[in-house]
Amino acid sequence: MAFGPFLLLALMEGLVTAAVLALTALGLSLVFGVMRVVNVAHGAFFMLGAVGAWFVTEWVGNPPALGFALALVICPLAVGAIAALANGLVLKRLNYDPEATIVATIGLLYIFQQMALTLYGPDARPVPAPFSFRVQLPWFGYSGYKLAVIGAAAVVLAGVWLVLNRSKIGLVMRATQIDREMAQAFGINVDRVYAGVFAMGAGLAAVAAVLIVPIQQAHYLMGGDPLLLSFIVVIIGGLGSLRGTLVAALLIGLSDGVISVFFSPTLAKIIATLLVALVLVFRPQGLFGRQVTR
Amino acid sequence: MTAKLGSAFPNRRSVLGGMAAGSGLLAAAGAFPGFVQAQSSAPIKLGFQLHRTGIGASYGRWYQRTTQAALKLLNETGGINGRPVEVVFEDDGTDPARGAEVVGKLATQHGCDAIFGPLFSHVVIGSAPRAGELKIPYLVCSEGYHVASGMLNRWTLQPGITDVKAQVRAMAPWVTANLGKKVTMIFPDYAFGHDHRDFFTQAVKEQGGEVIAHLAIPPTETSFTRYMPQIPAETEVLYHVMVGPAVLTFVKELGEFYGNGPRPEIFGFIDSLEAVNLASPGLEFLEGTHFWEGHCRNQQPDASVDETFYRAAVGVDATGASLADARDISTYSHMFSTWETLFVIKAGMEAAGYQGPKDRQSFVEAIEAMTTLPASRAHPQGDKIFNGKTHQVFGHQSISKVTGGQLMRVYQTSIAQGQYPDAVDYTQQSF
């Protein structure tokens, strides 16, 4: 294959990765930014979204588009509710102590994974795409659905940005992020903000999962890769910085696409991890993070 | 222990005396004197190292069903040496570290007489040394060349399924003669895939063909489109073998990539589609492509009586789906190996006059002495030849063509086509 189309395919693959990664990592970043919780169970929420999508589409049956649309609404809400519950039952009782919450979310990860294994089983199951048309380019064919994923992710990201920057909810969240005690003094119900943020973070992972599951199939172990990549993105972009998360997701997604097409996916992972190490050494707050002075 | 129980075979006084002495064991023996009397009629206990979870789960599900069906038949027809047989299933998570633990658990905690059943080669390679340490026969169903290569030990045998080296050597001549001589290979990047890479490449070369590109894919990969541009345009035959939960994604993306444009001939190992419905949306492009099958998923017009019996016993319909759920597709090309291995264990134990763990060594020697395994109810996949020196069995392979959504056999190899010179003589190794 000639260089041009080769690069085109690499970029398209990279954009799909970047789009889904941006959504997932945004959830992780939000939770860390506002709550200072390193959520190791984030990948499990991603997996729950995908598994939920399988249940919903299976329940609806035909037409696949209807099941998919319902899954896109129901799964993030359901996963968000589970997350809010986990927040109330576990994280809140630990007073959001950073070390304790890491261990607790590792525990949650295993609980969700085993729950999925018990209720859903160990198999990978396909979820039908809402539509299936192939884009036949002169050099190769490409799934039209993958292109739609990029668009859908962009829409969701824009929505999140609007909520954070243009709505009262966003204002309250940002206030809590900047100074929790002051926010409380101004009458903000911090507990409720935390529950909402944790639910929203998990919901974003679930949206990403529902979008990707017609491409990848739902499997109870599928949360590992998104978790690792999200951490990579969030560390490079700067923990808690949404702009940084987006830029880093594009950077990692596109470089992953290009490097894995031209060289090998393993090399792409190696380089991404190396990048994390370099960022941690030379700019620990991340590319767009602010120094935390407290 | 049994000897002690035997000598204590009760009169009423000794039982009471034993109970008074507080021996729970003797009390139990007194309550069920039948077991005590017939010490050699106690069940033979076999351990099954099962991929119930992890990336091998779909195989595990069917390996368990096949084994249970074989066990039912075995016990209905007199068990082993007249003793009933029990199988203890233990999940290894398709993980090598856990696999070794499972071997230990089955051997010491459950007190199994022998262990069988694992498929995934990294699990087998990780677990076999533990079986060797514990000196327990370990009969694998894994296709890997690691048994016959001499990498493992005298306690590890593969009497149920032909290894990859023999499979690909047997089929290479047909592939190069009928599909093309310039081959690109796509395979999982671990031991099993490396066997494919090494031996198929060599076999194609011997046929005057050439493998022009190797695409190694990590076994946990979930997205494959990015690998496909590396398939050289001059490829005549695309050889694919893939494992794990993402196999359906792989084949679908292959279809998306080629679409209705020009494509090379496609020759795949059915592993890429085990437990997957050929009628899944997105797989239409497979029509007219070829597959290796260890055991034909679709019932062939010339299916033998034994084959038909086996199919019904395991609960699989003529298309390879479960009788209970048409969407539950079997791993038909591989699962026969657990059935056949169980009957090899029976034959081996009976030949060795197996009584208990002290006879494990003579059991292994009895299997090493086997040569021809005729097609029968015990060997529904067909006749086989066992090589006692390399601990490896050799059977027939099938090449099927997707015709009208069905896998129809177009060629069957002879056993001799797969055989190769011995690389090891395990019988010279100490136990």
Image (spheres, helix red, strand yellow):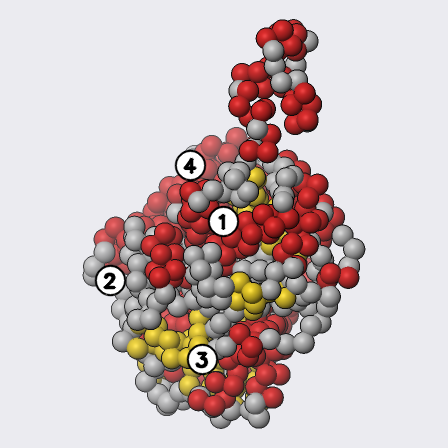
Asked if residue B29 is positioned above or below residue A87 in the image, the reply reads above
Determine the CA span between mark 3 and mark 1: 29 Å
Q: Which mark is residue A85?
A: 4
Q: Which mark is residue A65?
A: 2
Amino acid type, label 1: Arg
Residue B136 horizontal/vertical position (percent): 67, 47
Marks 1 and 2 belong to one chain = no
Determine the CA span between mark 1 and mark 2: 33 Å
Which image quadrant is residue A123 in? Answer: bottom left
Horizontally, residue B301 falls left or right of residue B246, namely left
Report the residue marked by disc 1.
B52
Q: Secondary structure at mark 2?
A: helix
Determine the CA span between mark 2 and mark 4: 30 Å
Q: Secondary structure at mark 4?
A: helix
Q: Nearer the viewer, mark 3 or mark 4?
A: 3
Determine the CA span between mark 3 and mark 2: 33 Å
Task: State which tag comes first along the sequence, 3 or 1.
Answer: 1
* Pointer 3 with pointer 1, Cβ within 8 A: no
Query: Residue at left 27%, top 76%?
Result: B404
* Pointer 2 with pointer 4, Cβ within 8 A: no
Which image quadrant is residue B179 in? Answer: bottom left
Query: Residue at left 47%, top 56%?
Result: B378
Determine the CA span between mark 4 and mark 1: 31 Å
Report the residue marked by disc 3.
B267
Marks 3 and 2 belong to one chain = no
Q: Secondary structure at mark 1?
A: loop
The number of discs equals: 4
Horizontally, residue A158 falls left or right of residue B378, namely left
Amino acid type, label 2: Ala
Marks 3 and 4 belong to one chain = no
Q: Is residue B83 visible?
A: yes
